[in-house]
């Protein structure tokens, strides 16, 4: 479990990138942090592995405060934290297998064992037959799979992902997010995932937090957030179905319904309403139905 509390980061030039961030990442869950450009997302993730020194606040991983660690303790903790990047950050002069083996090499693991582990990890990410390929011979999606395999090499308990799918097309994004979900389930890995795309949150996350000007302004499990009236996260997760022209005696409204959607819509139709558009999808643990309902003025859904 990762617990971030009162985290501040003020850069030497005076920019306040993080202004008191509080965020919990429960063990085994995938938590998405979403926010506009420049709002502090990368700074937040870089503070977690201490690539950036926090100005104030605490970051505890399984009870130990990362912000107070130094030397050997910090190095050991960093090995338990994997990281994947938007631009993959692979070494071009090394094969896929050699890239995956790099963290093991640094940790002093012998050559034969490194090779065996690298092959196993490449199998796990669906690239068992591409270990001898160089990054230039791989597609973007394949490169990110190598990046994921490398991040898993030191058997981390926490994986940090900073816009890991932003350089990929929609289909490849889906397959990489599916892979992250599978790894999360199979290895029990906790994931903190930074993105500026709500589609990524919808596809991959258990919980979501909205970062705005260096603060978490809203957060919660996806299924809970979508049911929150007036929520910015909900309106991002549930884009509008569109508009419909109605007569003067009619009223058009977009409604969001949950497990009882069928009964409520059937009752509205029986009362004289018509459904102009609808869609049902699974968001978090909930089934969410959106419907564009046109009612005679006296009927309410
Ligand atoms: N090393 C630095 N020195 C000074 N200011 C910085 C530094 N790094 C980032 N910043 C500033 O801190 C703020 C947050 O930057 P950050 O990179 O965390 O944003 P972000 O949410 O990741 O944005 P994006 O979505 O564009 O990646 C920005 O105003 C940025 O200009
Ligand atoms: Mg960033």
Image: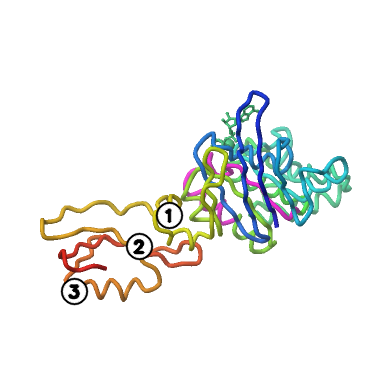
Residue 279 shows in the view: no
The residue at 80%/49% (across/down) is 115
- Cβ(mark 3) to ligand 1 < 8 Å? no
Q: Residue furthest top?
A: 13
User: Callout 3 environment at 10 Å: few (<14), some (14 to 19), or many (20+)?
Assistant: some
Q: Which residue is tagged 3?
A: 271
Q: Which residue is tagged 2?
A: 256
Q: Position of residue 110 (x, y in %)?
A: 89, 48
- The answer to whether residue 290 is left or right of residue 181 is left
Residue 180 shows in the view: yes
The residue at 23%/72% (across/down) is 268
Per the image, label 3 sits on a secondary structure element best described as: loop
Q: CA distance from mark 2 to mark 3?
A: 19 Å
Q: Are marks 2 and 3 in contact (CB under 8 Å)?
A: no
Q: Which disc is residue 132 wearing?
A: none
Q: CA distance from mark 1 to mark 2?
A: 10 Å
Magenta extent: 156-179
Asked whether 235 or 281 is in front, the reply is: 235
Picture quadrant where residue 277 is located: bottom left
Q: Judge whether residue 21 is colored magenta.
A: no
Q: Which residue is tagged 1?
A: 234
Q: Earlier in the sequence, mark 2 or mark 3?
A: 2
Q: Position of residue 80 (x, y in %)?
A: 77, 51
Q: Position of residue 56 (x, y in %)?
A: 71, 39
Q: Are marks 1 and 2 in contact (CB under 8 Å)?
A: yes
Per the image, label 1 sits on a secondary structure element best described as: helix
Q: Earlier in the sequence, mark 1 or mark 2?
A: 1
């Amino acid at each position: 479990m990762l617990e971030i509390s009162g985290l501040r980061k003020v850069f030497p030039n005076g920019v306040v990138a993080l202004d008191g961030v509080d965020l919990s990442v429960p063990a085994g869950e995938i938590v998405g942090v979403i926010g506009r450009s420049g709002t502090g997302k990368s700074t937040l993730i870089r503070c977690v592995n201490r690539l950036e020194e926090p100005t104030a606040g605490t970051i505890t991983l399984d009870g130990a405060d990362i912000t107070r660690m130094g030397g050997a303790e910090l190095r050991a903790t960093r090995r338990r934290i994997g990281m994947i990047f938007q631009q993959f950050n692979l070494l071009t002069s090394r094969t896929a297998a050699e890239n995956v083996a790099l963290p093991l090499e640094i940790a002093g693991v012998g050559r034969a064992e490194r090779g065996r582990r690298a092959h196993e990890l490449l199998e796990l990410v669906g690239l068992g037959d591409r270990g001898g390929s160089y990054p230039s011979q791989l597609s973007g999606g394949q490169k990110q799979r190598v990046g994921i395999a490398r991040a898993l090499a030191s058997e981390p308990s926490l994986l940090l992902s900073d816009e890991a799918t932003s350089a990929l097309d929609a289909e490849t994004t889906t397959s990489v997010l599916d892979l992250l979900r599978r790894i999360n389930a199979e290895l029990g890995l906790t994931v903190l995932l930074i993105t500026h795309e709500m589609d990524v949150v919808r596809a991959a996350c258990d919980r979501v937090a909205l970062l705005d000007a260096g603060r978490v302004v809203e957060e919660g499990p996806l299924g809970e957030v979508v049911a929150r009236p007036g929520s910015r996260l909900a309106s991002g997760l549930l884009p509008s179905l569109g508009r419909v022209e109605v007569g003067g005696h009619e009223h058009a409204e977009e409604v969001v319904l949950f497990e009882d959607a069928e009964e409520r819509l059937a009752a509205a139709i029986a009362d004289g309403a018509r459904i102009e558009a609808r869609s049902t999808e699974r968001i978090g643990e909930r089934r969410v139905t959106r419907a564009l309902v046109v009612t005679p003025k006296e009927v309410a859904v």
